[in-house]
Image (cartoon, rainbow, N blue to C red):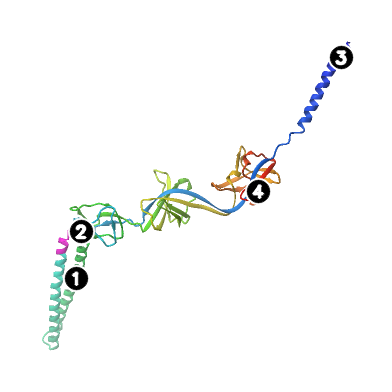
Amino acid sequence: MNMRTWIRPGCAVLLALMLVACGQEDAAAPPDQPAVLITTELAEQQVVEDLEFSLGRLQSNVDPRIAAEVSGRVLSVAVEAGESVQRGQVVAQLDAADYRAAADGAAADVRRLEALVEQQQRQVERYRQLVQENFFSVNALDEVEAQLTALRAQLAAARSGVDRARNNLDRTAVRAPASGVIAERLVSPGDYIGAGNPLFHLSTDQMLRVVLPFPEVLSSRLAVGQTLRLRVPTAPGMPVELPITEIRPVIGAQNRAIEVLAEMRNPGGWRPGGSVNGEVVLSRREDAVVIPPLAVIRRPSGLVVYVVTDDQVQERLVKVGVETAEFVEIVEGLEAGEQVAVEGASYLTDGARVRIAQERGA
C-alpha cells in the first residue's frame, strides 16, 4: 500500500471531526442580545365605569293639543305655528251667538223663578197667619209650603243652568292650557269643529322627555334607575345627570333598538325636537386595575403585558375590560403596583433584557 494514499483519507476524517467540534462549541455560546429601550408605568387602581353611548332626541314632556271644549264655527285664529303663547291666552274664537243666547235665556229663567219663589214665600206667610187664626187647615199650609219647596228646587237648577251656559259662552274663546310654542295649526276661519277636536299642537320646553335608543343586546343590562349623562350640541356645558325612569317594553321594528326614557326640567337652552348625546353607566368598579393602552400587546396566544423585574421582563396573558384612549382595564393577570413596559413593549419577548429610559409620568 502506498503511504500517501493512506494519509489522505486519514486527514479528511480528522478535518471533519474538527469542524463538528467547532460547530458544537459555537451552538453552546449564543451571541449576547442587546437590551431593549423601554418606558414603564405602574399598574394603578381607579374608578372605572362601563359606559354605552347613544344619540337620542328631546321631546316635550307636556305636549298638549289645544282642543275646543264646545262645538262651533271658527271665527278667527289669533296665532300661527312657531309663535309663543302664554297660559290662558286666547288663540282662537268660535261663533258665540248661540251660546250667548242660551246664557241670556237661562238668566231670564232664573229671574222668572226668583219672582215666583218670592211670591210663593209671601203666600206661605199668609197661610201661616190664617192657620193660626183658624181660617185655614194645616193641610192647606202644607200644600203651599210644598209648592215653595218645588219652586226653590227649580230655581237652583236654573242657576246651575246659567253657570253652564256662561261657561260654554266663555269656552268659545279657545285658550292655551299652558305656556309654550305653537307647533302646528290645524284649523282655519270658517271651519266647523266639534267639542274635543284639536285646533293646535302646543309644545312646551319647561319639562322635557329624553329618548335614547340602545342596541337590543343590552336589554338585559339596562335598568330603571341607572345613571344617564346628557349633553346637547346647542348647550355644550356641563353634562346633566339623571336616572332612567322608564324602559320601553318592545324592540323597535325599524332600528332593532330598545329605548330608555328619562324626564327632566329644562336646564336652559334645550329644545324639544333637538338631538341629545347620552351615555348610560352600565356598571361601576371602584378599585379597577388600569394601565396605558400601549402596554397591552396582541400576540398569537392572546393579549399580553410585559411585567418588568430588574432588567428583564415576564410575558403575561391578561384579560381586559373597559378600553378607552387613556387606559385599559385589566380584569385578570396583573396586580396593582406591578411595573409594566409601555413604549417599546411591542418589541419584547418573554425573558428579554430591557433598559428603562424613564417611568412615564415621572
Q: Read off the residue under disc 3.
A: 6
* The quadrant where residue 89 appears: bottom left
Q: CA distance from mark 3 to mark 4?
A: 67 Å
Q: Amino acid at mark 1?
A: Arg
Q: Nearer the viewer, mark 2 or mark 4?
A: 4
Q: Read off the residue under disc 1.
A: 159
Q: Nearer the viewer, mark 2 or mark 1?
A: 2
Q: Is residue 314 above or below residue 157?
A: above
Q: CA distance from mark 2 to mark 4?
A: 79 Å
Q: CA distance from mark 4 to mark 1?
A: 90 Å
Magenta stretch encompasses residue 100: yes
Residue 28 image point, x, y percent: 77, 32
* The quadrant where residue 298 appears: top right
Q: CA distance from mark 2 to mark 1?
A: 26 Å
Q: Specify which label sits upstream in the sequence, 3 or 2.
A: 3
Q: CA distance from mark 3 to mark 2?
A: 134 Å
Q: Nearer the viewer, mark 3 or mark 2?
A: 3
Q: Residue furthest top?
A: 1
Q: Specify which label sits upstream in the sequence, 1 or 3.
A: 3
Q: Specify which label sits upstream in the sequence, 3 or 4.
A: 3
Q: Pointer 4: residues within 10 angstroms few (<14), some, or many (20+)?
A: many
Q: Specify which label sits upstream in the sequence, 4 or 1.
A: 1
Question: Residue, x 17% and y 61% (percent of image)?
Answer: 96
Q: Is residue 286 above or below residue 347?
A: below
Magenta-highlighted residues = 91-101
Q: Which mark is residue 339?
A: 4
Q: Quadrant of the N terminus?
A: top right
Residue 290 image point, x, y percent: 59, 50
Residue 159 image point, x, y percent: 19, 70
